[in-house]
Image: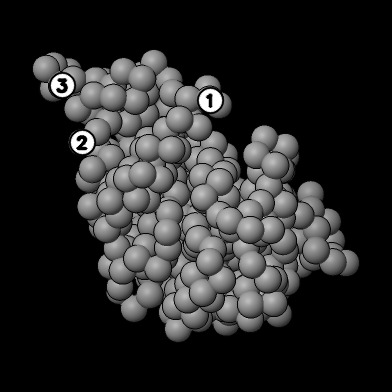
Amino acid sequence: MACDLAGHGAGPGAAAAELERVAGWLRAHPTQELDVYGRGALVETFEARVAELLGVEAARWMPSGCMAQPIALRVWSDRAAGSHKRRIGLHPTSHLELHECTSYARLHGLEKVTLGAADAPFDATHIEAAGDLAAVVLELPTREIGGQVPSWEELVKISEAVRAGGGRLHLDGARLWQTMYDNKPLAEICALFDSVYVSFYKDIGALPGAMLLGPREFIDEAVVWQRRQGGTLYSAHANIVSAMLNLEDRLPRMFEYRAKALAVASAIRSRLGRTAFHSITPDPPHASMLHLVLKGPSQAELEALRDKVALEHGIRIFSRIRAEVGDGLWYTEISFGDACLRIDDAQLVAALDAFKFE
């Protein structure tokens, strides 16, 4: 079987293996108090652990980011005063805008103000030009543009600009784990934000689950909204244990994933124009992910070439093509994880060299 360049190399048996791992942990801890409606030692200990890691006062386990983030914006909006009470700032590619059926507007009555252009992170000047906002969402890294991040200096300016306008800055940290600013601790990054969301299946590779973090009073209000939206499950112990175990395993490997992303990008860069690789975004990668634009006669032929390389060289360069972006150009995404660490340099070079049409 070919090894995927992206992800953690989950094969057909991965789902069963993860559930067996969770079951094994539960058998080894028979006296562990499980969660019931969001309370209990299991979930509360994990919440405290993540809050400490990110340097935030309080945390709440939630089923998904699609629930957690609009709730965060609702809480901050309810606390705002004046005519900007319902105005929130979003990047054009924000997950809340593209993938959540505008729940922020439909469920919470919030009004979007678009910040910046779709192909780059917004900056402090966009905040200042938008006028007063109740809250601003900033995603680190920004997935839809290849994992780009603003510079540290610009991030500080954004934080200052939002707060100077009386707003709150919320971190869409779905992939926060792979965000690196000169080895700054995650807590130093999160200190620039008023609230934070993280995912445990993205990058960490756990069963689905998320966490919302912020000041204690903020989390207390968020808990009420979670219940109102049907998110206070009777128990989520399997997902919580999975998140706990995978965070422990994979968080220390993030620097390895990042190093591999830089190495793969460098190898692909030297082959642009003489293979089916057309461009890399961003180049070099800002995190442990990137977008690749591929050049070929058709999507089907690019996928056939991928499969041919996988058969002959044992590496599946990408999983799927996401969209056509020009005449004969398609883009795909690679997010690096455990799988890439199992690939040696010689094998990678041979596979990349073979990714071309004769």
Q: Look at mark 1 in the image and give the residue it sits on.
A: 228
Q: Amino acid at mark 3?
A: Gln
Q: Are marks 1 and 2 in contact (CB under 8 Å)?
A: no
Question: Label 1: few (<14), some or many (≥20) within 10 Å?
Answer: few
Q: Amino acid at mark 1?
A: Arg
Q: Secondary structure at mark 1?
A: helix
On the question of residue 271 being in view, the answer is no
Q: Look at mark 3 in the image and give the residue it sits on.
A: 32
Residue at position x 63%, y 58% from top?
82
For residue 67, which quarter of the picture? top right
**Camera-side residue of 41 and 284:** 41
Q: Look at mark 2 in the image and give the residue it sits on.
A: 45
Q: Amino acid at mark 2?
A: Thr
Whole-angstrom CA distance, mark 1 to mark 2, is 24 Å
- Percent position of residue 43, x then y: 27, 31
What colouring does the structure picture have? one colour
Circle nearer the N terminus (3, 2): 3
User: Can you say whether 235 is above or below 247 in the image?
Assistant: above
Whole-angstrom CA distance, mark 3 to mark 1, is 28 Å
